[in-house]
Amino acid sequence: MDASVDRIADPWGGRTPYGPGTAWPVRTDTYLEDGVAPQDVDQWVQTSSLLHSNGDAMDVAVRDGRIVGVRGRGADRVNRGRLGPKDLFGWQAVASPARLTRPLVRDGDRLVECDWPTAMDRVVTRSKELLRQRGPSSIGFYTSGQLFLEEYYTLTVIARAGIGTNHLDGNTRLCTATAGEALKETFGCDGQPGSYTDVDHADTIALFGHNMAETQPVLWARVLDRLAGTAPPRLVCVDPRPTPVARRAQVHLAPRGGTNVALLNALLHEIIRTDRVDHAYVRAHTVGFEELADRVADCTPEWAARICDVPARAISEAADVIGTAERLLSTVLQGVYQSHQATAAAVQVNNLHLLRGMLGRPGCGLLQMNGQPTAQNTRECGANGDLPGFRNWENDAHVAELARVWNVAPEAIPHYAPPTPAMQMFRFAEAGSLRMLWISGTNPAVSLPELARVRAILAQERLFTVVQDLFLTETARLADVVLPAATWAEKTGTFTNADRTVHLSEKAVDPPGLARADLDILLDYARRMDFRDRDGQPLVHWHDPPSAFEAWKLCSAGRPCDYTGLSYERLRGGSGIQWPCTDQAPEGTERLYTDGITWAGADVSETYGRDLVTGASVSEVEYRALNPDGKAVLKAAEYLPPHEETSEEFPLQLNTGRTLYHFHTRTKTGRVPQLDAAAPDVWAELSPAEAEARGLAEGDLVEVTTRRGSVRGRLRVTAIRDGMVFLPFHYGYWDAPGGDRPAVGGAGRAANETTVTDWDPVSKQPLFKISAARITLVEHGDGTPAPAPTTTASAPVAPADVPATVGGALAHASQVVPDAEAGDGSRS
Ligand SMILES: Nc1nc2c(c(=O)[nH]1)N[C@H]1C(S)=C(S)[C@@H](COP(=O)(O)OP(=O)(O)OC[C@H]3O[C@@H](n4cnc5c(=O)[nH]c(N)nc54)[C@H](O)[C@@H]3O)O[C@H]1N2
Ligand SMILES: Nc1nc2c(c(=O)[nH]1)N[C@H]1C(S)=C(S)[C@@H](COP(=O)(O)OP(=O)(O)OC[C@H]3O[C@@H](n4cnc5c(=O)[nH]c(N)nc54)[C@H](O)[C@@H]3O)O[C@H]1N2
Ligand SMILES: [Mo]
């Protein structure tokens, strides 16, 4: 079967149905630039997608030293050849004429071009000056979930053992800090228990605050193929928006924002009440059952229904579906991680799996999802708030082991307090103790909450800001030094997706102008700073991606994310491989916890745990008493109301998030014609009842206002729950109509003008999904609909009035299903 499909109009492509326990058929998706045929391609270069956490494996087509297209890798376990719309079209941003080609340094209120020695000299001079005058805590690093493993590891060694600062975090703090924290609280350690192949086996799939159809479209295609095959799984969806997932669900619960804990406690209540508990599993592998049962004893569906504003009947039905599942797969993402009581709620999903004994078997997967393509590596390399290799900063033996790997004194690695979370780093910069902030691969002037405050912090004279990026972003415009980076397809490295699959990404083309790989920039800095180990040898003793990878392998040895069985050679040519990969498990490891819980013992765990309400650390002594045999911990949590409640002045809950066609602050996808056209500007979503109550209609220009600021956009009337307004967060001001000046104090178009400075007490992840807002009319529209896609959660309630989102000729991609694969899914 060979077809050409408009992949903007049909983001998931054609169906290849399959039945439970059979392999997901291959479908190879290819997109080549207009006028290029497969035989014109000089070279296909192996990589994987850098525009979400799914890890879709692909080859980049190169012709005359330029990228001209992409093709999915049929041999790969993750996508079996399929690509999503961002994968198919997003590569065009790499060759954008807007790319930075030379370093820039600040000269008064201007940024002027310079050479590398000039730029690096400014950075090194300021670093040394600050180390001398104010000490290591005056320097901070804020990195990404979009660089490569080799780069994070190098940055971690530089920051922790070279500079000696505790201030190193990633934008993963905004993204998957809660995923890591929820796994730590339950299993003692980070590490995704499940596998994407659980989709092939599950009889029930529950998605909690995860719009998989838009944010991991290829994984959703896998689910759609199961739904189209024999014995399809039942779907439960918990999301206040009518996402494509919700539309296919057996049970869709659309709760009030911030009420996940109440809902989950009711589900746990029902599982226990109906005794659908796997008591043998609970006895063998967990502690804390009595406390959990006590905690949820009064959490009836009727109780939760009042808090969540969903029918009690629907909660019971969801509990019934989950309670009767024999192979339950759950996924959790930002509707939990960025909402009220984030970690407490994510942990209750772990509890559902433990109570039901749904772990470590095919189809019994738990996916505390990642969002960014390389967020897993930020966490495992310790470029977020943890020590490399999921080591416990409170365990002196772990710090000593790390010191041995780095050949430094244990005291050289700061571990006097938990590593500083990003929001706290910005607070330190605001207060003045942090004087240099090196930002790589993230655009906080659009992605952090309460942007007026963030801009004010970054614009301070006394804060020296280095920004390492591909483009002159909103953040780069506020920098003192801008370093032009090479990116995906212009450099080599590895990265790991949400189900622990490690992929190699090879260099296909040269970067523009003087742009350099992030690794080379960091190695250059380490050389110029002359960081030394305890024998006087260079601290950072590697010099390229393969040697950095080898250094990391040593650091990972014996830890859950053990890479010692991997090499570039092994990753080349075939499929990605899941860690841990060792001599004992040379093909990698599909599922964790197949044989009991392995990383929760106090000597090996990444944490001793935290209180789910206050975030306070549990002491080592307490943890040993609570969990002497290193089992999974069933941690209970009480529902508490959200901090910023709605009021007469701000009667709506504000929800923010994503659309299928754009990635984050659009530095890439905003520069791709097919993707830009599908969702070219910001909009606001409201239900028909809320719109009618305010005399608003599709296409009206509205203003969404909170205590922090406001955003203007056109109204889309959708089937979102009543009492809520939704804004996509993708739209910064770099290409806003009216030029590229920040919308200070006025009506902007970045959702984060309005969001609140508040975070989860346990994971320190900001709460982007919950604050209080009002919506007002600016002017009625002329009948033109909002610039929101119709194929997604933003589908209009009155489809007749809004032209369908299509891509046209430029968006046609080919999809090829080998004849042997195109069956009815009944093969076994
Ligand atoms: N197209 C696209 N894909 C992406 C990205 C992108 O920018 N664009 N980014 C990647 C990254 S970094 C991430 S982190 C992921 C994020 O992927 P997702 O988490 O799937 O995306 P979001 O839109 O942020 O949020 C998911 C849903 O949470 C719901 N929600 C809001 N509040 C609540 C609540 O209180 N309870 C519940 N149950 N649900 C709630 C929202 O209605 C929304 O539909 O996507 C990754 N993939
Ligand atoms: N209101 C609201 N805010 C949110 C969210 C939300 O749902 N709602 N979601 C949050 C989440 S989950 C996330 S992940 C963040 C994302 O927020 P950001 O990380 O700020 O978003 P990006 O636009 O992906 O920024 C990445 C930057 O890295 C640059 N870049 C890309 N590749 C490379 C590279 O190889 N090297 C270097 N040096 N730079 C590179 C890009 O040009 C871009 O400027 O936003 C968060 N903010
Ligand atoms: Mo994210």
Image (cartoon, rainbow, N blue to C red):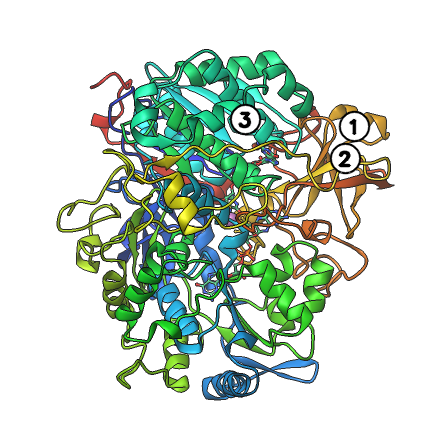
- Ranked by sequence position, the earlier of labels 3 and 1 is 3
Residue holding disc 2:
652
Cα–Cα gap, marks 3 and 1: 36 Å
Q: Amino acid at mark 1?
A: Glu
Of tags 3 and 1, which is closer to the observer?
Answer: 3
x, y percentage for residue 241?
Answer: 62, 30
Q: Which one is in front, 3 or 250?
A: 250
Q: Amino acid at mark 3?
A: Arg
Of tags 1 and 2, which is closer to the observer?
Answer: 2
Decide if residue 304 is on the left or right side of residue 520. Answer: right
What residue is drawn where x is 73% and y is 61%? 452
Residue holding disc 1:
690
Q: Amino acid at mark 2?
A: Leu
Secondary structure state at the residue bearing disc 1: helix
Q: Which one is in front, 436 or 559?
A: 559
Q: Is disc 3 surrounded by few (<14), some (14 to 19) or many (20+) residues within 10 Å?
A: some
x, y percentage for residue 272?
Answer: 46, 17
Residue 519 to residue 763: above or below: below
Q: Is disc 2 surrounded by few (<14), some (14 to 19) or many (20+) residues within 10 Å?
A: many
- Ranked by sequence position, the earlier of labels 2 and 3 is 3
- Is residue 176 visible in this depiction of the protein? yes
Secondary structure state at the residue bearing disc 3: helix
Residue holding disc 3:
295
Quadrant of the image for the N terminus? Answer: top left
x, y percentage for residue 278?
Answer: 34, 19
Secondary structure state at the residue bearing disc 2: strand
Q: Which one is in front, 78 or 267?
A: 267
Q: Is disc 1 surrounded by few (<14), some (14 to 19) or many (20+) residues within 10 Å?
A: some
Picture quarter containing residue 361?
Answer: top left
x, y percentage for residue 6?
Answer: 47, 36
Of tags 2 and 3, which is closer to the observer?
Answer: 3
Disc 1 vs disc 2: Cβ atoms closer than 8 Å?
yes
